[in-house]
């Protein structure tokens, strides 16, 4: 089954899933100044706690099986990946858990902070009413991170039925949608981040793009990863854009449900690139902004979201160095049925969330310091014999001859 690019978004936009949950206790409100939005501190625990209105938070400390997955060469489909992760926590009675990452209209950008000593990464997740989850991870062997998940993608796909049946069920019988137990949802969510920030300041966003092709790479000697599990590996194993690109270079990407996405990857030094898959290859282009059209010269401008791109670009021109409120206002200017907006602070390793277009109330969370067991040395090194991510010596990153942009193409030799 393959979904139509915009049909899915437009059809699902005709309804809303409504649920009410009791809010978790929140620390004392913080107000920066008279014009600033109130910011409430939130804390993650091992429970799936509700912050407000179907907006939840949790954390996971320890081993969640990522290194074992990479050593085994990864998975080329979400079904096997999720089966593995649920069995890892001792749940052996599932055969229909899968994720769906289609239909997003999103915006993301990186900008220098006001003091010029760091960067912010802003992100809107544009979608219908959903159940977001903030996931903090503190792995035994990797970098800690904050990430965000749409858990409805996991629950909907666990129905394991054709799109037409799924749509009818969600519209007419939403109460019958299978709700996975929190222990399964919690471990599955680790591997399905839509965006994230790690302790080294690396930030990533996954945004939808259009096209009548798909990506299933099969070069020998590479690790097999799906659309969102690749984000998890980069957050856990890469400190910089260059290290993240090394992971991309040595990964066979398998697009979930044959759907196309591109990534914005930015680090604490200010380097920012998009990774887009064109003609079976990953194409890397330096950029500070993405929405839902291609940045690479091969397909430049194909897609949609140019208006949101221009809104963010205009704000960045107006405020070359931003504070957190400027980033928030830039997201507000580009929001379009946004379910969550995030101001990631790449310097201080913290995030402020705004829910469903309400930019008058923020929720702040911060990574704990000195938690990671990861070495400070580069985790992705093609000369390191103990490297977890497979590296093929016959692959290189080739600089583009274009004078208009700094592009790289990661070529595969199949």
Image (spheres, helix red, strand yellow):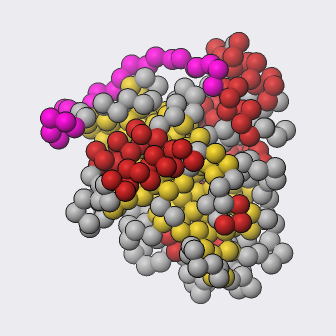
Farthest residue to the left: give it.
Answer: 34
Q: Position of residue 81 (x, y in %)?
A: 70, 50
- Residue 75's image quarter? bottom right
State whether residue 351 appears in this view.
no
Q: Position of residue 91 (x, y in %)?
A: 65, 39
Q: Position of residue 227 (x, y in %)?
A: 66, 53
Q: Residue at x 36, y 23 (%)?
A: 23
Give yes or no for residue 18 being in the magenta stretch.
yes
For the N terminus, the quadrant is top right
Out of 241 and 92, give the one closest to the viewer. Answer: 241
Vertically, is 219 above or below 59? below
- Left-right relation of 123 to 232: left
Q: Residue at x 76, y 50 (%)?
A: 211
- Left-right relation of 193 to 364: right
Vertically, is 21 above or below 37? above
Out of 298 and 117, give the one closest to the viewer. Answer: 298
State whether residue 108 appears in this view.
yes
Vertically, is 360 above or below 409? above
Span shown in magenta: 13-36
Total numbered labels placed on residues in the image: 0
Q: Position of residue 37 (x, y in %)?
A: 25, 35
Out of 149 and 308, give the one closest to the viewer. Answer: 308
For the C terminus, the quadrant is bottom right
Q: Residue at x 73, y 71 (%)?
A: 222
- Left-right relation of 219 to 226: right
Give yes or no for residue 29 being in the magenta stretch.
yes
Magenta stretch, overall SS: loop
């Amino acid at each position: 089954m393959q979904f139509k690019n915009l049909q899915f978004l437009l059809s699902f936009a005709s309804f809303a899933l409504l649920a009410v949950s009791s809010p978790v206790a929140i620390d004392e409100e913080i107000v920066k100044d008279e014009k600033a939005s109130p910011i409430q501190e939130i804390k993650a625990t091992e429970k799936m706690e509700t912050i407000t209105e179907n907006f939840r938070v949790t954390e996971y400390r320890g081993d969640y099986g990522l290194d074992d997955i990479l050593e085994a060469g990864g998975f080329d489909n979400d079904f096997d990946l999720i089966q593995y992760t649920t069995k890892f926590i001792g749940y052996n009675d599932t055969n229909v858990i899968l994720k769906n990452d289609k239909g997003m209209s999103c915006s993301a950008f990186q900008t220098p902070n006001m003091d010029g000593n760091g960067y912010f990464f802003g992100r809107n997740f544009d979608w219908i009413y959903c159940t977001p989850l903030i996931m903090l991870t503190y792995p035994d062997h990797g970098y800690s991170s904050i990430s965000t998940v749409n858990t409805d993608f996991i629950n909907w796909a666990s129905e394991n039925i054709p799109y037409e049946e799924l749509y009818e069920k969600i519209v007419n019988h939403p109460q019958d949608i299978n709700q996975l137990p929190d222990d399964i949802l919690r471990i599955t969510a680790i591997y399905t981040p839509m965006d994230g920030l790690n302790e080294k300041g690396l930030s990533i966003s996954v945004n939808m793009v259009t096209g009548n092709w798909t990506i299933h790479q099969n070069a020998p000697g590479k690790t097999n990863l799906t659309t969102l599990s690749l984000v998890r590996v980069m957050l856990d194993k890469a400190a910089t854009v260059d290290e993240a690109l090394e992971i991309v270079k040595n990964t066979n990407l398998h697009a979930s449900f044959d759907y196309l996405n591109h990534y914005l990857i930015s680090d604490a030094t200010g380097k920012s690139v998009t990774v887009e898959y064109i003609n079976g290859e990953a194409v890397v282009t330096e950029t500070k902004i993405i929405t839902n059209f291609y940045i690479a010269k091969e397909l430049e401008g194909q897609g949609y979201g140019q208006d949101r791109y221009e809104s963010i670009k205009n704000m960045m021109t107006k405020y070359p160095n931003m504070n957190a409120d400027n980033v928030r206002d830039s997201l507000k200017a580009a929001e379009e049925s946004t379910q969550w907006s995030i101001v990631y602070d790449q310097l201080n390793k913290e995030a402020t969330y705004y829910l469903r277009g309400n930019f008058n109330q923020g929720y702040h969370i911060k990574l704990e310091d000195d938690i990671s067991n990861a070495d400070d040395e580069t985790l992705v090194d093609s000369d390191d014999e103990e490297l977890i991510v497979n590296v093929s010596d016959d692959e290189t990153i080739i600089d583009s001859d274009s004078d208009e942009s700094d592009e790289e193409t990661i070529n595969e030799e199949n």
